[in-house]
Amino acid sequence: MNKEKMNGYKKIFFLLIAINLITIRIYAQSFISDNPIAAVLDSLQTQKVFEKAFLKPIFPKNNKFKYTPDSVPVFDDYSYQARLAKLDALSPFDLVYNNHVKSFIDLYTVRKRESVSRMMGAAQLYYPMFEEVFDRYNIPLELKHLAVIESALIPYARSRAGAMGLWQFMYPTGKLYGLSVTSYIDDRCDPYKATVAAAEYLKSLYSMFGDWQMVLAAYNAGPGTITKAIRRSGGKKTYWEIRPYLPLETQGYVPAFIAANYVMSFGPEHNLYPALPRKSFFEVDTVIVKEQMHFDQIAQALDVTGDELLYFNPQYRKNIIPAGGNSMCLPKTKIGLFLTNEKDIYTAIKNQQQDKNIANVVEVKKTHIVKPGEKLSTIARMYGVSLSDLRTWNYIGRRGVHAGKKLVVYVPEQKSEAVKLDIKPESKNTQNIAQSKETINTQLAQNSKNNSVTPENTQNKKTDSINYITHKVQKGESLYSISIKYGVSTTNIKELNNLINSELQIDQYLKIKSKN
């Protein structure tokens, strides 16, 4: 064989290698971009509630790595390997470094940096609670990072398959671990209840496989899929050995978990800092709500925003907390206000419901037996519920239902009884509440001044023929506390004074209709 022919073969050989490498790179990139983990990270940018739940990250000017704010550091394989080795030494997980893990590290630290910053901020709200629950169940605390790849710490995240919440429970699995779903409440989105269910499920999976990497794979694909992969691999018992026999999504699951451990532990090394949450875990607490309340009513009574209530209470599907002792998560600064005025708040809400002819809505569980030729859409219309709810309650797939199948339906019905209570003209509890209010927007303040009553008459002096009084707003007073004091609705005060919103200023005068 002559020299020219040999060189020609060499060129073809190296060309084939180059094509192979390019194909592998394109495949890896498309795999990552199409992966649900990347998709849920992207959704962090479209959540309006998250926009208001976080402030921008505080970039430390004197950071030990001397980075500028726009720096995006990239390291060699040895650095990644050394850092993961430190984590691995303290972990029951096999935190190895390879090209699969590297792809996800790149996803977190380079391509999705803003989303990761928000995720780090959300971790300040959820991680302490995760650790408390996992410690109680004696399972590795590193599993808190599992919620990162499941939901990107979005408490109401929903997958294409219908899994919900921080821990992405499907309806039947959630039900198996005590998470109920009704028209008004989805326990899969309750951060605490879902975390307890996740701990129980993870412990159950460990009793099956005895290996935490296999537990992760089973959490994603289901224990049945893992058992099949073990058989197809010839009886292999570790994740990396059975990985070629797993679904494509599960093949990326453990590498993504290892990368999540890495980025949540070495954020500053990559110039990544958490977007500051408006409230961390230690700044919120829960109270039990005895009567049905809408988020709008709570926001009005406690002077909190609807977005805050939605972010802290994602389990309530229609912004309604049903009666019957359900929990409500609030900033700690509002807990005392609620407990002090709890009875007055319930009374005011009942009176408001009576004024508007509104009764409390409760859910009644009913059973429907499917008749021949009956469609799901017809059944949903019959009971006045949504088709998606009907499917969720009964775990109905694309094939629909057959005649004779029993369906669970939660039908909204109104309570016939309505308790009428009179609000005391003056509540000592309410008057004693003194809370500092945040500085409001200058324009809103000006509008409020323009729309308020001028102090032509002194406080509590009657004006006009219909008997009005003027009230001078004191420090710590809200529209709601003033309405309680005079026994009138907040809506009445707003309409009478042409107020655009519920914001008030100290020394502002309000015109109020007298009961005399």
Image (cartoon, rainbow, N blue to C red):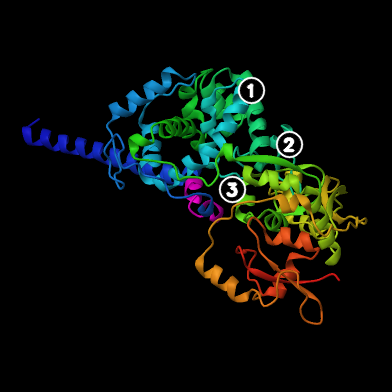
Local SS, label 1: helix
| Labels 2 and 3: the sequence-earlier one | 3
Q: Amino acid at mark 3?
A: Arg
Please, is residue 29 above or below residue 486 in the view?
above
Q: Which residue is mark 2?
A: 175
Local crowd at mark 2 within 10 Å, few (<14), some, or many (≥20)? some
> Left or right: 26 with respect to 136?
left
Q: Which residue is mark 1?
A: 136
**Residue 48 within the magenta-colored segment of the rendering:** yes
Outermost residue toward the front? 458
Q: Which residues are magenta?
A: 39-50
> Left or right: 496 with respect to 382?
left
Local crowd at mark 1 within 10 Å, few (<14), some, or many (≥20)? few
Location of residue 170 by image quarter = top right
Q: Amino acid at mark 2?
A: Lys
Real-space Cα separation, disc 2 to disc 3, in angstroms: 19 Å
* Residue 160 locus on image (x, y percent): 59, 48
Location of residue 209 by image quarter = top right
**Residue 11 within the magenta-colored segment of the rendering:** no
* Residue 304 locus on image (x, y percent): 63, 54
> What's the residue at 67%, 56% (across, down)?
299
Q: Is residue 357 visible to us here?
A: no
Q: Residue 160 bears which disc, if any?
A: 3
Local SS, label 3: loop
> Left or right: 312 with respect to 25?
right
Q: Residue 87 bears which disc, if any?
A: none
